[in-house]
Amino acid sequence: MAFDMKNFRLDGKVALITGASYGIGFSLATAFAQAGAKIVFNDVKQELVDKGLASYKEIGIDAHGYVADVTNEDQINDLVAQIEKEVGVIDILVNNAGIIKRIPMLEMSAKDFRQVIDIDLNGPFIVSKAVLPSMIKKGHGKIINICSMMSELGRETVSSYAAAKGGLKMLTKNICAEFGEANIQCNGIGPGYFATPQTAPLRERQADGSRHPFDQFIIDKTPAARWGDTEDLQGPGVFLASDASNFVNGHILYVDGGMLASFGKQPE
Ligand code: NAP
Ligand code: GCO
């Protein structure tokens, strides 16, 4: 059968991107919209949902926004039922919502550790479990989990985040194993270091106007010698959300400028 570029389109599909008022989720949603999808997103606060709706409207996207906490199973089940009633059955889920707490392990409370695991790992489990039944009934579905360099690597102060994102990589593989036969594809995107609010503390200019030491560290560790721009994630995202990836399953697509492939820039 001749290859058809239509395979990369998302026309008529309903995409739920969690935590997509801004940042990576917002960027993926704008690309999905351009590929033809109807955009649905949630956030934990009404003011953020309103801000997100205004941002989507500004660029001509008529998105649907809802207040829901990904860690709250009742809220998520009600959200999915409301989306199915008001927009349609969810064809594409992006588990994007996530937080990070940068605390040295010996100073981190179990409560803080649990909160990161709850949002970054339990959340994707809860939301995936809520959307899978209708995807199975419909005979197809795409789940994309936003993983991380910390799905593969540790680093000081991010024990909870690395544990969560490592777990999310394995949840991705498990959903593939359990639902592949139902024509559900579950893959991950593993961004490298991207300039978003989440990484702003790592990029702050120093008092003398110089780069944050971590900023230079990332540039030296990345063969592309730059931080990622969220637009770098749009093509990989549309690919994994589209029919073009129907035989790709359980895969983590790292979009990291080569970071995981490289030892880092050698000293001059
Ligand atoms: P971000 O700018 O901090 O945005 C995260 C979004 O998730 C925010 O809208 C946030 O809403 C929302 N959120 C947090 N907790 C939530 C909850 N319980 N329920 C629903 N929404 C919730 O982060 P980002 O940089 O765009 O990252 C998005 C995803 O990519 C995260 O999973 C992150 O771990 C991952 N990632 C980021 C990078 C990077 O370099 N930036 C690299 C690899 C992976 P609030 O504002 O209300 O908290
Ligand atoms: C950090 C960063 C990273 C990025 C991303 C890398 O503190 O090291 O926040 O965790 O957010 O996850 O892939």
Image: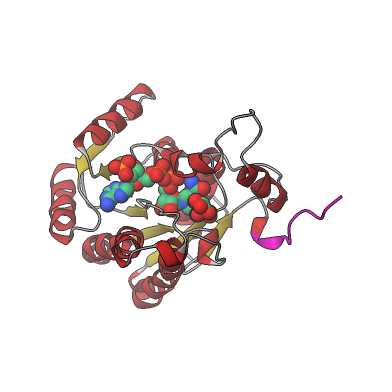
In the drawing, does residue 180 fall left or right of residue 131? right
Q: Quadrant of the rendered structure where residue 10 is?
A: top left
**Residue 7, can we see it?**
no
Question: In the image, what residue occupies the spot 12% across and 53% down?
Answer: 78
Q: Main secondary structure of the magenta part?
A: loop
Question: In the image, what residue occupies the spot 53% across and 46% down?
Answer: 233
**Residue 234, can we see it?**
yes
Question: In the image, what residue occupies the spot 36% across and 71% down?
Answer: 175
Q: Quadrant of the rendered structure where residue 216 is?
A: top right
Q: Residue 229: within the magenta?
A: no
| Foreground residue among 258 and 83 | 258
| Foreground residue among 160 and 37 | 160
> Image height check: is 79 above or below 151?
above
> Image height check: is 35 above or below 141?
above
Residues rendered magenta in the picture: 260-268
Indicate the colouring scheme. Answer: secondary structure
Residue 168 image point, x, y percent: 41, 66
- Where is the N terminus found, in terms of image quarters? bottom right
Q: Residue 267: within the magenta?
A: yes
> Image height check: is 187 above or below 21?
below
Q: Quadrant of the rendered structure where residue 9 is?
A: top left
| Foreground residue among 20 and 195 | 195
| Foreground residue among 5 and 198 | 198
In the drawing, does residue 233 fall left or right of residue 165? right
Residue 15 image point, x, y percent: 32, 47
Residue 219 image point, x, y percent: 68, 45
